[in-house]
Image: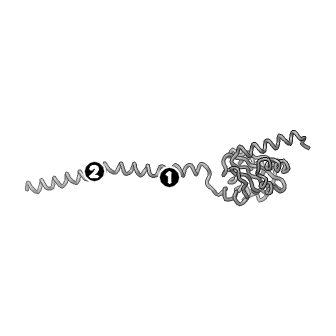
Amino acid sequence: MLKKAEKETVVAELKERIANNQVAIMTKYVGINVAQVTDLRNKFRQADVEFKVYKNTLARLALRELGFEPAADYMEGPTAWAFSKDPVAPAKILKEFSATVQFVSMAGGVLDGKVVSPEQLIRLAALPSREQLLAQTVGTIAAPLRNLVGTLNALPRNLVSVLDEIRKKKEEESAAAAA
């Protein structure tokens, strides 16, 4: 049994994690074995995602104090939390993991200060990762620059070709006039 001071510390910790991360995902994990939990924790650790279990009563209190009380409706049974600054990473990991371990599923959460449903989290998991989005953005920005460089390189080449054609024509005219 946690003492009142310990409970206040846990609530404050959960509130801080929700406030300082872009996403906080509640996860159902009934029936998962130790090896599977270890595997999930390792995947989260590699993606810089924090994963922790909180008592639902304390989590409800933290959600109420933050103004996210509707999110508490998604908590049913044992609930673990995944926190990340990258909003897509934990959702992707949980979606992939739940494909092989049916005992794990996203129950709901908080994304950028808004309560999100499991369906919204599944759609979030379908998005490209931050790195992929950055690469696509850089590619989109770089494409016109590449085209411009190609066009600028073509101008001198085309000028040389035109000048060469004029030279050949002048030589033919000179040869025809001399004959």
Task: Please give the label number shown on residue 159.
Answer: 2
What whole-number distance in Å separates the C-alpha atoms at marks 1 and 2? 30 Å
Write the residue at 58% across / 51% down. 133
- Outermost residue toward the left? 179
Task: Decide if residue 110 is on the left or right side of residue 168.
Answer: right
Q: Nearer the viewer, mark 1 or mark 2?
A: 1
Tag 2's secondary structure? helix
- Residue in view at x 27 percent, y 49 percent: 160
Q: Is residue 161 left or right of residue 135?
A: left
Identify the secondary structure beneath mark 1: helix
Question: Which disc is residue 140 wearing?
Answer: 1
- Look at 78% across and 44% down and name the residue there: 14
Q: Position of residue 116 (x, y in %)?
A: 72, 56
- Sequence order check: which comes first, mark 1 or mark 2? 1
Other residues around mark 1 within 10 Å, as few (<14) / some (14–19) / many (≥20):
few
Mark 2, residues whose alpha carbon is within 10 Å: few (<14), some, or many (≥20)?
few
Given the image, on which type of amino acid does mark 2 rest? Leu
| x 27%, y 52%: residue | 161
